[in-house]
Amino acid sequence: MAAEIVITGGRVIDPETGLDAIRNVAIDDGKIVAISEFALDGDTVIDATGHVVSPGFIDLHAHGQTIGDYRMYVMQGVTTALELESGVLPIGDWYEGQAQKKLPINYGASAGWTYSRIATFSDTDPLATADYFQEAQSRSDWKFDIATSDQSSEILDRVEQGLKEGALGIGINAGYAPGYGQKEYFALAELANEYDVATYTHVRYASNTEPQSSFEAIKELIANAAITGAHMHLCHINSTSLADINATLKLVEEAQAKGINITVEAYPYGAASTVVGAAMFTGDGWRDRMSSTANNFQLGSDRMTEEELADYQANKPGTFITWHFLDEEKPEDLAKLDASVAHPSVMISSDSTFWAYFDDNGNIATYEGDEWPLPDYVFAHPRSAGTFAKILRSYVRERGVLSLNEAIRKMTLMPAQTLEGFVPQMRSKGRIQVGMDADIVVFDPETIADMATFANANQPAVGVQTVIVNGKFALQNATLLTDAAHGQPIRNAVQD
């Protein structure tokens, strides 16, 4: 009997078994049902000659959660995009909202600690939206104040409720609220260990100098993991380490060698995206700690002036900007970025941001429409459109920093294995094997490329021929299928 889909003649790479050979792949009922050297019959046949057939890429750090964001992920070959670093609350509301969007790829989220902190200090009910987080940037109490005993209980209770509603762990966006107490972070690690889930931390500090350095913040995370036994995931070690990446990577290596359950991610850009009023851009000496002036900040396509930076920090602190911390044109800076991306213990995540635009009043708003291609007037960080394609272009094909197999491992198997111990659905993802979920990308290794730049990020990646999600096409013949709605929730069991 013919399978629904057969992919023929492609170079099939499975990072778990080590398969790297020309094979034919059959797909039926959302699963891979055959991998063979011999011909297979299919109702739809994809000729993958000269192409790589890989597990779909898995992004553990994706902030953009609208239909336009997900379509840009598809163009790169992403089949699962999860909001884990920041997370959201209430979790149940968020999953219900995503289910209504008819998304092309799989989605999921963690329970957001910052959302709980904002709600507790502002005496409001959290809303599972990016606006709730952005609008809270004008307050400083949730960022810098130590929680009272009652507040601590309320913060933890909300996070725990998120876990009961099926969250994929605890998102700890500590860099946005660095004034928390040691006991609060420790309690979050204990809670994660109790529920057998991971935490996903943007560490408290990002600084080249001590005290309150990147080194100190990562050491804090490692200490909590060692004492509590919790699995603690370190988000974007490249951007939070700044120029001190070699020292922080050594910390991670020593912790992992001692059996401490630390996992790590990075993205391949020397610039970050954050709100202009983030806590790390405040206080005495922040410019020296961050080695930054206004020229390091980019709003839309232009670098900011000192006057603009002061105005936005005072009056529009929730505005998302791009912050340049390494110059990839300088060999010494590129070497620091490469150290994080190429490290064998570091997986690739995008930290993708929202697509935004300037409204009639000059304020930045999140684009939530379904127009495709995206309207010309929207902008974002280029990693939102190019992370995975940039790895395959720059790090594999052009510079040879990574082998193709290692790059695919970092973008598929490693993120799946990070979650699969406590998210059962992930045990069937990140692999090309019989019985695994048919989340597959077919790309041309000679042409795949990121097109997005800091001047114009609104340019989809090229070189991806086919994207299959749960056995159905999201992209076919290099063309996005705008009616594809095959994404499924990645969610833990809901508890009473």
Image: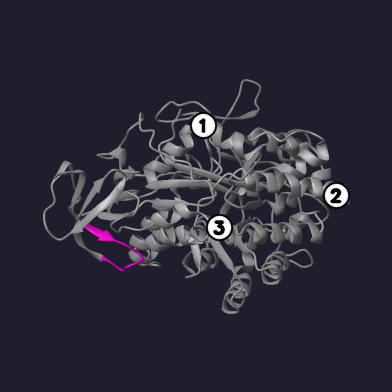
Q: Name the residue under label 2.
A: 145
Q: Position of residue 6 (x, y in %)?
A: 19, 47
Residue at numbered disc 1? 378
For the residue marked with disc 3, what is the amino acid? Asp
Magenta residue check for 367? no
Which of marks 1 and 3 precedes in the sequence? 3
85 or 402, nearer to the observer: 85
Q: In terms of sequence position, does the residue under pointer 3 or pointer 2 come before the other? A: 2
375 w.r.t. 203: above or below: above
Among the 4 quarters of the image, the one containing residue 119? top right
Q: Is residue 13 magenta?
A: yes
Q: Identify which residue is drawn at 71% across, 42% down.
A: 115
Mark 3 or 1: in front is 1
User: Looking at the image, do the residues carrying marks 1 and 2 touch, with CB atoms under 8 Å apart?
Assistant: no
Q: Position of residue 175 (x, y in %)?
A: 71, 53
Q: In which quarter of the image is the N terminus?
A: top left
Depth check: give the residue in front, 422 or 279: 422
Could you tell me if residue 357 is visible in this image?
yes
Q: In which quarter of the image is the C terminus?
A: top right
Q: How far apart are marks 3 and 1 (CA)?
A: 24 Å
Instruction: Tell me: 257 left or right of 417.
Output: right
x%, y% of residue 308?
Answer: 71, 37
Going by the numbered disc 2, the residue's amino acid type is Asp
Q: Residue 327 carries which label?
A: 3
What's the residue at 83%, 54% (across, down)? 284
Q: Residues within 10 Å of mark 1 (few under 14, many from 20)?
A: some
Please state the extent of the stretch shown in magenta in the rendering: 10-19
SS assignment for the magenta stretch, majority: loop
The answer to whether residue 463 is visible is: no
